[in-house]
Amino acid sequence: MTEIKLSIGYEEYEDGQKMETLIEELAEKPEAEQLSSLIIGSWGGAYEDSSESIVAALVRLKDRFLALRSLFIGDMDSEECEVSWIMQSDLNPLFAAFPELRSLTIKGSTDLALGEVKHAKLEELTIICGGLGKSVLASIASAELPALKKLELYIGVDNYGFDGDIEDVMSVAKPGLFPNLAYLGLKDSEIQDEIAAAIAHSDILDGLETLDLSDGTLSDEGAEALLASEKVRRLPKLDLHYHFMSEAMTRRVATELPNADASDRQETEKYDGEEYRYPALTE
């Protein structure tokens, strides 16, 4: 597998370096024809410049990247740009431009749009963000992705982009929507208990190898719903790491659900009579 990461530092950005230029330069190199994995890191001003020109460059030069199977747009850490600041764009043109693509990872959800999603061979779709908009969830819920095996969505919080409800979230988990789905991640959510309760008895669990409800605000309430489900008990793997279950419930989950990862227990914050729980990734 040939993998290349393109990235622009702050000083390079201030000097006028552009990500589309790096893509153009890469397209002219002999290794472009063999490139199977392309990672687009920081484009320097991701907090003010969207990924629109990057998408346009990739689409325009698609015939130079015929071996591309994996694409990551927005791979940057918080020092380069906070996830909630990353300006994305309409990524829909990528689906038609790269029909052989198997994996697409997107980081950042500000101004993100997917449109009408159709792709015959995509096997993995991951969106990492502090808040996923319901318009993006709707695009996924109506997508035609017959080969999809892994769907990993960071749901996030309303302060950073999540503007939906439990119905919007569960719309992407309809049984039969993605017939080959083996991994479903509905994670990093401030409504993790609601998600746990809604999915605990869903027929979608019958075909999954992994259900990932990690990195969110899961508490004893959501855990009770999971424990009451025979479908959950039959899952090969249940990822609950980073949670707000009590010590007693964590022990119970470990005992009754040996398929579960219940590590990284968090403490609920209490202030002025109110309780506060936060997902792992928000800002």
Image (spheres, rainbow, N blue to C red):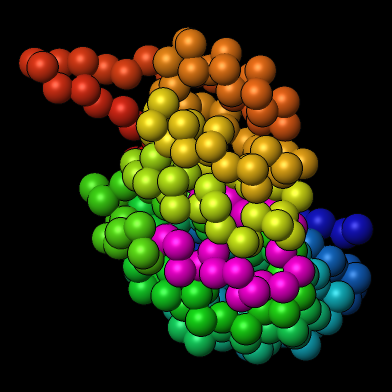
**Residue 7: image location, x then y, percent:** 60, 53
Residue 106 among those drawn in magenta = no
**Residue 14: image location, x then y, percent:** 41, 53
Q: Which residue is drawn at 57% across and 17% down?
A: 252
For the question of whether residue 132 can be seen, the reply is: yes
| Residue 45 in the image: above or below residue 111 | above
Q: Quadrant of residue 179?
A: bottom right
For the question of whether residue 151 can be seen, the reply is: no
Residue 250 left/right relative to 78: right
Q: Which residue is drawn at 70% across and 57% down?
A: 206
Q: Residue at x 50, y 87 (%)?
A: 116
Pick whichever, 91 or 177, lies toward us: 177
**Residue 42: image location, x then y, percent:** 53, 52
Residue 178 among those drawn in magenta = yes
Q: Residue at x 57, y 42 (%)?
A: 229
Residue 173 left/right relative to 163: right
Boundaries of the magenta span = 169-187
User: From the image, which quarter does the N terminus lie in?
Assistant: bottom right
| Residue 26 in the image: above or below residue 159 | below
